[in-house]
Image (tube, rainbow, N blue to C red):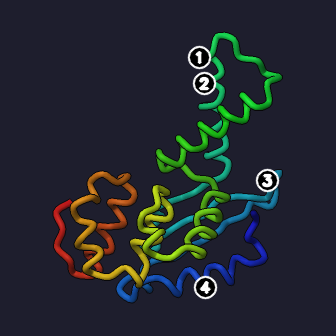
Amino acid sequence: MLYSPKWSKAKKHLKSFICDSLQSRINFQVINYRRAHDQLGRAVITVDKIEKLSMCTITAEREEFRRTWDKRIEMEDFDFDDVEMNRSLQDQSHEQLKKDGIYGQYDFFDALEKYFNAPIKDSLKSTDILIKILCLLDRRVGKRTLLKMKETILTEHVLVQDFYKLRCEAENILVAV
């Protein structure tokens, strides 16, 4: 899904969810590469004008290809003509990339769509790192919820932990993470 004509509207909607304490510090950018074959590029989350998360399509696709290729090599009887097997390996690689915090621009748009269309309670339970990050920045997540998360935050990806620390600092909540 390409957001380009609707990105400004989606960005405005997304910014409306950012908590007051981070409103002026957080920014979202989408950079499209016109000369790229699919015209996708990067999505970036910045804090105080410093990139904290860059979701580059080229980087993600290159890494997905490499991981899929490695899985094929590990298999002794891999059949390149087996479309289902190829698709399955590619899907496995893509899911592993997301767990490792390596995203393409399209993953950001997909996470945005899910985040916009789900209740905040459901989004907080998501296993998607991007959705969790968006929740941590959300004004609907209050101090009590942040304090409850203190116990489980150490099991989350380091990116989620970083945004948790940022939000807690902005809200003057003392946490030792």
Residue in the foreground of this view, choosing between 9 and 49 = 9
The amino acid at mark 4 is Lys
Gap in Å between the C-alphas at discs 2 and 3?
Answer: 27 Å
Neighbor class of circle 2 (other Cα within 10 Å; few <14, some 14-19, many 20+) is some
Q: Amino acid at mark 1?
A: Glu
Q: Residue furthest top?
A: 76
- What residue would you read off at disc 3? 36
- Callout 4: SS: helix
Per the image, the residue denoted by label 1 is 74
Tell me where residue 68 appears, x and y as whole percent: 64, 30
- Nearest to the eye among marks 1 and 3: give it: 1
The answer to whether residue 32 is left or right of residue 141 is right
Q: Position of residue 23 (x, y in %)?
A: 44, 85
Mark toward the start of the polypeptide (1 vs 4):
4
Per the image, label 1 sits on a secondary structure element best described as helix
State yes or no: discs 3 and 4 in contact (Cβ < 8 Å): no
The reply to whether callout 4 and callout 2 are in contact (CB within 8 Å) is no
* Of 77 and 21, the residue lying toward us: 77
Quadrant (top left, top right, bottom left, bottom right) of the N terminus: bottom right
Q: Are marks 2 and 1 in contact (CB under 8 Å)?
A: yes
Precedes in sequence: disc 3 or disc 4: 4
Q: Residues within 10 Å of mark 3 (few under 14, many from 20)?
A: few
Residue on which the image places disc 2 = 71
